[in-house]
Image: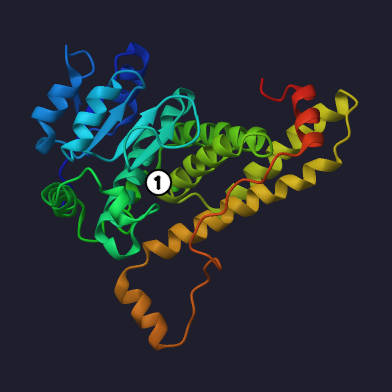
């Protein structure tokens, strides 16, 4: 049975971004509602909030005052913020950042934002990342119930974390689309490596973006390793040509380990409760990270930063 379309509010004014959103959101799965060019996008979002399941946001379209008003009324939706990676969350509780040059991953990022919302709101005992009382300080009890309830009605009780869309798995995409998605993932992984030792906040955002798409596109682990190896090989050749040492590149294995740890955690969380119960009853322990909290990018390394900057790998 075909899944109903998810209705997405688009608060985007940039013409190229608007066109990219229309291009990369599959018709039939998503219905895009353009609000960015309205005179008061925040008021339109507030007025039609019950119709929307998620939001696309271009930084600057919502004023701080408008956002504070929406938040005070509990009108907070899963969001994809389309802009350069800039560190911590700035707009919505359940937001995912996506750089403008990686729009091919937009549908996967939306799935990630929605699944994060379902997971956090369906597990109040976990308190979210900052504790439930702090996370939901501005949200009413009614709004806390309505949005997850509406999403579960459309996506199934366990949400998109369990019911991934197999038609958008990498192996099921047409050859041309598969190639485009892989190139986009390579750019994301490149961002991760470049910022890994010098900008932990940006590295964590790039890591999250890569892992979200890898999970929802069912990217093979062997392909993830291949992307890492190819990228390190590219860096090695540039450093060699420019006469720099390459020994420090082995430290970037930490980035690959972080990606694998995040992926393990996402797959662990995707298991339905009955599978976990069955596994426990047969004394078969699933392979999971030792900690449920995702690891953070390592602190800066002066030598690595100097050599990478000198080689100008940021083409």
Up/down of 236 relative to 36, above or below: below
Residue topped by disc 1: 172
Q: Is residue 275 visible?
A: yes
Nearer to me, 295 or 172: 295
Drawn side of residue 36 relative to residue 96, left or right: left
Quadrant housing residue 44 = top left
Counting from the top left corner in percent of width and height, residue 114 is at: 29, 46
Up/down of 265 relative to 10, above or below: below
Q: In this view, which residue lies farthest toward the bottom?
A: 282
Q: Residue at x 34, y 80 (%)?
A: 277
Neighbours of disc 1 within 10 Å: few (<14), some (14-19), many (20+): few
Drawn side of residue 41 relative to residue 182, left or right: left
Q: Is residue 123 visible?
A: no
- How many circles with numbers are drawn on the protein? 1
Q: Residue at x 79, y 23 (%)?
A: 310
Drawn side of residue 239 relative to residue 87, left or right: right
Counting from the top left corner in percent of width and height, residue 48 is at: 10, 30
Counting from the top left corner in percent of width and height, residue 274 is at: 30, 76
Label 1: which secondary element: helix
Drawn side of residue 301 relative to residue 223, left or right: right
Q: Residue at x 23, y 36 (%)?
A: 71
Q: Quadrant of the C terminus?
A: top right
Nearer to me, 68 or 156: 68
Counting from the top left corner in percent of width and height, residue 215 is at: 44, 51
Q: Residue at x 17, y 16 (%)?
A: 40
């Amino acid at each position: 049975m075909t899944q109903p379309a998810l209705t997405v509010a688009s608060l985007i004014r940039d013409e190229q971004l608007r066109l990219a959103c229309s291009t990369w959101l599959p018709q039939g799965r998503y219905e895009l509602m353009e609000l960015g060019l309205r005179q008061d996008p925040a008021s339109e979002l507030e007025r039609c909030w019950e119709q929307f399941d998620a939001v696309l946001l271009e930084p600057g379209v919502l004023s701080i005052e408008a956002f504070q008003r929406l938040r005070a009324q509990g009108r907070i939706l899963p969001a994809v913020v389309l802009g350069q990676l800039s560190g911590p969350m700035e707009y919505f509780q359940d937001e995912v950042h996506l750089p403008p040059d990686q729009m091919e991953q937009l549908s996967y990022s939306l799935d990630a934002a929605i699944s994060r919302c379902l997971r956090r709101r369906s597990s109040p005992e976990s308190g979210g990342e900052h504790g439930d009382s702090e996370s939901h300080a501005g949200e009413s009890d009614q709004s806390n119930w309505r949005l997850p309830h509406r999403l579960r009605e459309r996506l199934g009780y366990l949400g998109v974390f369990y019911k991934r869309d197999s038609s958008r798995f990498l192996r099921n995409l047409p050859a041309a689309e598969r190639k485009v998605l892989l190139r986009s993932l390579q750019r994301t992984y490149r961002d991760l490596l470049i910022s890994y030792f010098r900008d932990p906040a940006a590295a964590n955002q790039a890591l999250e973006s890569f892992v979200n798409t890898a999970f929802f596109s069912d990217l093979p682990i062997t392909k993830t390793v291949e992307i890492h190896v190819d990228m390190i090989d590219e860096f090695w050749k540039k450093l060699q040509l420019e006469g720099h040492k390459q020994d420090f590149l082995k430290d970037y294995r930490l980035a690959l380990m972080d990606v694998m740890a995040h992926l393990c955690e996402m797959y662990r969380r995707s298991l339905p409760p009955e599978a976990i119960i069955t596994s426990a009853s047969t004394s078969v322990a699933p392979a999971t990270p030792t900690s449920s909290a995702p690891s953070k990018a390592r602190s800066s390394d002066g030598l690595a930063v100097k050599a990478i900057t000198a080689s100008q790998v940021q083409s």
